[in-house]
Image (tube, rainbow, N blue to C red):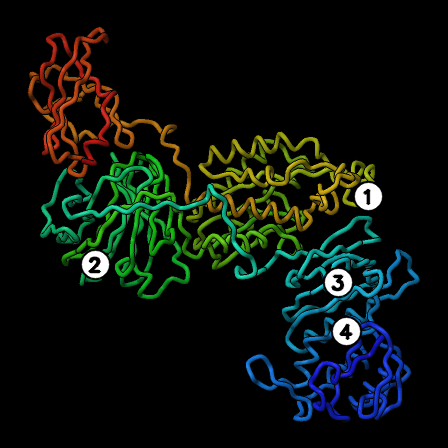
Amino acid sequence: MAVKQLSDLLPAGSVGDTDLLLLRQGGEDKKYEAGGIFGGKYGLNSVGGASQALYQDAGIVPNTVADTISSSQYLDALKTYVKPASSISVQGPSGSERDGQSKFDDYTSILDFLGIDDDDGSLTTTNNLIPFSQYFQYLNSIGGGRMYLPKTNTGGYLINGDDTTLVTSPIEIVADEGVYLRIIYSGGIGNSPFANNNVKCNRQILKIQQNFGFNNYTQPNTGILPAETLPSITQGQGVYSEPKVLVGNNFSIVDLADPSNNIAPLTSVPDAITFSGTGKEVAAVKAARIGDETFALMSNPTAGIFFAGVLTANGHSYYSQDSGTQEVMFVDSTAGVTSPIVTGVPYTLMIQQRDLFNNSLMSVRVISARKYSVLCNGLVIGTYNTRSNITGVMFGTSQIDGVTSVSQFSSITTNSKGGSKPLRIVALGDSISDNDVQYSPYRVMSSILQSQGIQLAELNNLSVAGETAAQQYARLESVGVGYDYCFAQVGVNDIQGATSFSSFSQIIVDICTKAKEYGMIPIIGIPTQFYSLAEANANGQTGGQDTLNNQGGYTYRALLIRAVASAGGLVNLQSLKNQGAMTGKWLSADITGVQTDTLVVDNIHPTPYGAMMLGLGWAESLVGALHRLDDSDSQLFESVPTNWMRNGFGATTRPTIKGFKLAGKVHFDGLTNPEGTPFMQLPKHLRPIEVKIKAVTCLADTGLPSGVANLYIGVDGNCYGFNIPATTVSMSLDTMDLTDVAFV
């Protein structure tokens, strides 16, 4: 075992006899020359002499009491020996002088604490319990640092016994390839600093938990910074964004309380449109295709509420901000709601002038016939499923009497999704996601999300080992408002405990309902797979958790999906899909390049690999919830509003609409002569800028076609029928697509 003095590491002549740094780093013993630590001062060349030298230069007289975890003269010597001194200084990379303490921190390893990697599977090799405890204590005392674990022998470090040393500083383990730990202890996060969540690692390190009969691993991914991982893309992940310039005439001014009441703008020029606020909800509205993202600036010299959102066939929906209080709100008055729903929406950390709606680049992205997102400076503020089909996007003001300007507008056809405002998330779960478990998937998820432009302002992990869904619901009840999403990875303990199917279904509904009541979007994870102790032992594992009812989980998983659907929540299927096949066979598999990592450590709890895949699933589900899918084809048509109808037409049946497609029929009801009489008027933002004439099918009272007529749509939005056959009682609009009307 070699001992190196600081002169081996620093320029010649920079080390004095009384200010020295001893480092034990492996290799052959050296005999030191005069002027060195041992040759000149002690005449020693052994490891024992090295310790004597360390004690003497640190001013400590060693006693005969053996070092322990709580009391160590050797650790005290290391802490006090190297002191700032002008005789031990070296220029750092930036030109600043570095003292001996700084140099020692760079090169110290477990060997400096008399640790030895000689594990051979027996109990007769070196017990590194005290060396590791001293190393952790030392790093705590200097505010953290790297713990170097070199491979000089077998690479295995035996740790036999409990170590209650706390990890109070940021520590990263840097291990050579082939290093592993064999730990014999009573278990629990308080009896080994290696179970601490805040200890980072440069690689996955095998931890043989001998007395528990299964292996575990350190987790290299948890808590990594975004800059430590290089993002990657595939060919299919490219972003295409084609902009189009809009002008004032593309917009119409609408009073949201009476959408049929069109308001004349004060001014309309190529790059702006202005209107009087009048204290009402007034907006500049423009038709928008699915997939379009429309951008605009909003301003008004008077403080008040600024909003961006969508106009629908039977209402409106938007996200707003009070420019005075900076409070962000959500408003929904779409079909099925008699009055607006107003729910507080957190605007976490974004409180500077550049973040205000009236001082930012605002945009509205139409995702599908009934889904949209509002973005502020490219970050999603909120995504919502409306109850009515979207007909246009809008930018407006409320509770403002001054002149509002909507300007510098453009539209982009893009597949870009965008990041998000900083999010607050409540997370429910059991021991699989408990924050005290080193491999909580929620912790991995946080690191993954950062590469997608999504930061978490808060992750309130309420998961508790051993709890059922009902117990987690009780914790959710006490949370209250202020969060954006509620994640729930529950059900494994319900499966093991055979919770009744009806009770389990109801509690999942309750979780979704309570989350929505608090203003959160609930995302519920499918209970993960696990296997039995017998299956694990049959494949070479000697220990593990004696799990129950793994074969009965399928019913709970099916019930969970149905319960979430009935409560209007979202489901995370990736917690089941991303892990792939869950089988004890992987423990004994010998397939080159396959299953180097198992999925679970003890039949049920995830390994770092398993946690990574679960965390990836939660990240995928959150990104999906932010950006949603275009499911327009599955959305239903809805009747156009009665205020679109004219001259008594449509009393029996009215046309239906979805996006920009009309369907159904308008019944003439025999009230007036339909020929050349307006039967419907399109809202201003859907009107053509030139006359459109289309052929449509007419129907007799038998329901059979009576012939073909001409549908005439004027620039004022009035719709007429011409050349209507005599026996006609209604006109079909099934072939009518307003896309070429709204976008000319």
| Residue type, numbered disc 3 | Ser
Res 500 label:
none
Question: Residue sitting at 12 percent across and 10 percent down?
Answer: 725
Whether 86 is drawn above or below 409: the answer is: below
Residue 506: image x %, image y %? 54, 35
**Which is more N-terminal, label 3 or label 2?**
3
| Residue type, numbered disc 2 | Ser
**Residue that label 1 marks:** 541
**Which is more N-terminal, label 2 or label 4?**
4
Label 3: which secondary element:
loop
- Check whether the beta carbons of the residues at disc 3 and disc 1 lie within 8 A of each other: no
Res 134 label:
4
**Residue that label 2 marks:** 299
- Check whether the beta carbons of the residues at disc 3 and disc 4 lie within 8 A of each other: no
Q: From the viewer's side, name the closer residue of 312 and 540.
A: 540
Q: Is residue 472 visible?
A: yes
Query: Looking at the figure, which quarter contains the N terminus?
Result: bottom right
Rendering quarter of residue 10:
bottom right
Label 3 vs label 4, nearer the camera: 4
Left or right, 431 with reference to 320: right
